[in-house]
Image (cartoon, coloured by chain):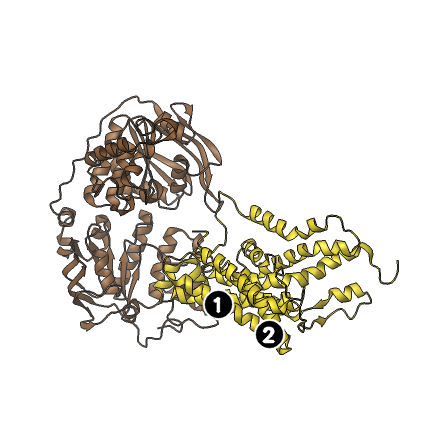
Chain colours: A yellow, B brown
Amino acid sequence: MSGTDIGFWGVPLAMFAGAIRVSTPFLFVSLGECLTEKSGRINLGLEGTLVFGAMSGYAVSYLTGSPWLGVLAAGISGMFFGAIHGYICKLPKVNDIAIGIAMMLFGTGLAFFFGKPFIQPQAPHLPSINLGGWSDYPQIQSALEINPLFLVGAVLAVAMWWAFKNTRWGLIIRMTGDSAPAALAMGYSVDLVRFLATTVGGFFAGVGGAFLSLYYPGAWSEGLSSGQGLMAVALVIFSRWNPLLCFGAALLFGAAGAIGPALQSVGITQGYYFFNAAPYLLTLFIMIASVSPKRSLKGAPGELSITK
Amino acid sequence: MTAFAEPTGAVRRAVELETVGMTKIFGSLVALEDVSVHVKPGTLHALLGENGAGKSTLVKCIMGFYQPTRGTVMVDGKEVVIATPRDAHAHGIGMVYQHFTLVPSLTAAENLVISRAHPPAVIDWKKEIAGLEEFLERMPFKVPLTVPVASLSAGEKQKLEILKQLYLDQRFLILDEPTSVLTPGEADEVLGLLRGMTEAGDLTILMISHKFREVMAYADDVTVLRRGQKIGGGKVGELTVDDMSRMMIGDTKIRERAARKTFTGQKVTLELAGICAEDDGGMPAVDAVNLKVHAGEIVGVAGVSGNGQSTLIEVLSGQRDMTEGQLFIDGENFEPVRQQMAKFKVFGLPEEPLKNAAVPRMTVAENIAFRSFDEPPIARRFGFMSPKPMRKRARELIAAYRIKTPSTEEPIENLSGGNVQRAILARELSGQVDVLIVANPCFGLDFASVSEIRSQIMDQRNRGAAVLLVSEDLDEVLELSDRVAVMSGGGIHYVVPIAEADRNSIGKAMAGH
């Protein structure tokens, strides 16, 4: 065995690397969705927010030369989408799921419309932090090239988990999500709390989009997201609305998404497309495993329109 | 008084409250007319009245949910303006609602802390828990602080609701039927302790109730409302139960109860053998229930709500699968599906009929036809349906059961609760009934409807139907049943003929002893 060939160890290593790389958008979207759903509303439009975030992040990075400004722009545009969703859902007799689907189509459509001129040009990418300098293996070195956004996401997950338990705003959001009458009785505006939660959730999803176009895969194209924003919704259910579990589930989905490329890297090309479908299959199996006709979902916020 | 409650300066004492000429008009409906009630400090004042008598309108005006059309509220002798519930809280007036306002997924401690007007931005749980424990030390009852409220029993939730108001330093409590979810033992405990606090001058209570027993035992004064007006009241000791009930219902004609026909040697019709079932959370809710109901017999299942009764009813009416056990009717295996219900003539009056026995947006005629629309004369060949016989049948039943509806084509959700229940009764009881399964049939209905519906149930028994009655109203169970069974913790471990039934041992069985 030569010095740099690690043989089939490359598969788990590539999956590990992939888990970290691919999971970041999942993580951001699922944390955004988790926040929104904890307040009692579902935003299915985060797929559109993700795509629009990817486009706007890429565009701003290209135009200003600063990828971090791109991330900020993606977040702000995501916030805007969240705010639209949150505002429309405040109106009487509006169904949040239908609005979510409309926002998803609106977001992707708008992104394609404005994104046409940015498909070709190269925008500056986000830098990565090299944590693998101690190793001689280039595979390990490349696996440990970690994007700062991943670390931000991990910190955010822990912070949200802590905040839901230990801060006034955390308790208010959980209260609105679990019992609107109770929140109203205590004088909190349920609509305002949900509006803010949806808006901030949109910010997170937008940042997740910027990661897609500015780091991995690292270019703006129309097929960039391929439904990751929707899978993140399934992921939140799987995580039982717990931000820490969202982090773990995002890693799991990331690893599943990396199976195909990892196998390809060691020369197994058979079933490449099948293995690429792993995250979608995983979504399906998770949904089947986590629901039952006889039980209601444990841990689900009581005000969600799907659990009511 | 404490570091963690709202800073109020001095120790608050019982509040005195008086309403003067309270009137509330909604459009053309006079919900409340010139009601003046004086609640003296340190007393427990009972507010009696039927549904729709204006009790909740009155307390909502006091709490600032409604603005009275005329009239004022005086607190400690001074006229005050209460525009919102927050204003009421500022005057020390708090309310414990019939439906809980606790957040199920939050713990008791979280619920208490977040209920404060200004909870800290970052909560120091060590300090808060210590503070709460110190607060509980001084309180008459205890609840576990660190488990989610969803896993507390109904009694503990009710205590926590009351504790919450005391924690917020409210010294005038409005309690809306506070004992409806408690066992008789728990009710006595809670009311006894609250009464102790009023006697000590720490608290004033205005309690909405319809249980004369509790009013007689614990209240100092009583006010009776009827149709929005104050009909009477006074010191509890100076009024009899008869006086109060006459004030409540006025001269409404009450249908005479059907006499109980005596049967001997009746066969077992309905048998529940080892029924087990799970609730929505996948937790066991019904635990090996065995029960036999004879023809011409009413078996009443008493119990505090949340002890598996609704799950049992859902199993019997086919809304939920059982995990173990079998049902028999006349010795034959019975599965609660449509064909077998028709074959064995099984009918039911589930609780909350608008939700469990009707499609709210379908018409009265359609709802009445649910048992018969797939049979001639309504059903015709090739799956077509003819609406004419359906409407004709509906008109007959609307007349026979005195259902108040504009027409057969009115969506059933527009009917009042009593009329929805009558429509369902008409559908279920108009044919031959062998087995009748009834759950909380009179919940939220006025006196006249209650009496009517109970008579109908008794009629079915006298005609030889086997009746299983599940009710949270112990008085209803004691009035109707031939045998009383008590459900607690998902099981039935206590069955007694009505002649040997006494409140005490039933109360103990309800509490699981």
Is there CB contact under 8 Å for labels 1 and 2? no
Residue A290 in sight: yes
Residue B129 in sight: no
SS at mark 1 in the image: helix
Q: Residue furthest left?
A: B251
Q: Quadrant of residue A87?
A: bottom left
Q: Chain of mark 2?
A: A
SS at mark 2 in the image: helix
Q: CA distance from mark 1 to mark 2?
A: 21 Å
Q: Which residue lies at the image location 28% right of the left edge and 55% below the top edge? A: B191
Q: In the rendered structure, find residue A199 and report the number of the disc placed on it.
A: 1
Q: Which residue is mark 2?
A: A60
Q: Nearer the viewer, residue A122 or B226?
A: A122
Q: Nearer the viewer, residue B489 or A290?
A: A290
Q: Which residue lies at the image location 73% right of the left edge and 66% below the top edge? A: A144
> In the rendered structure, which disc, 1 or 2, sits on the residue that comes first in sequence?
2
Q: Quadrant of residue A235?
A: bottom right
What type is the residue that disc 2 sits on? Val
Please tell me how crowded label 1 is: few (under 14), some (14-19), or many (20+) other residues with Cα within 10 Å: many
Please provide percent x and percent y for residue B352: 32, 44
Q: Quadrant of residue A231?
A: bottom right
Compared with residue A33, is residue B5 higher up or lower down, i.e. above or below? below
Q: Nearer the viewer, mark 1 or mark 2?
A: 2
What type is the residue that disc 1 sits on? Thr
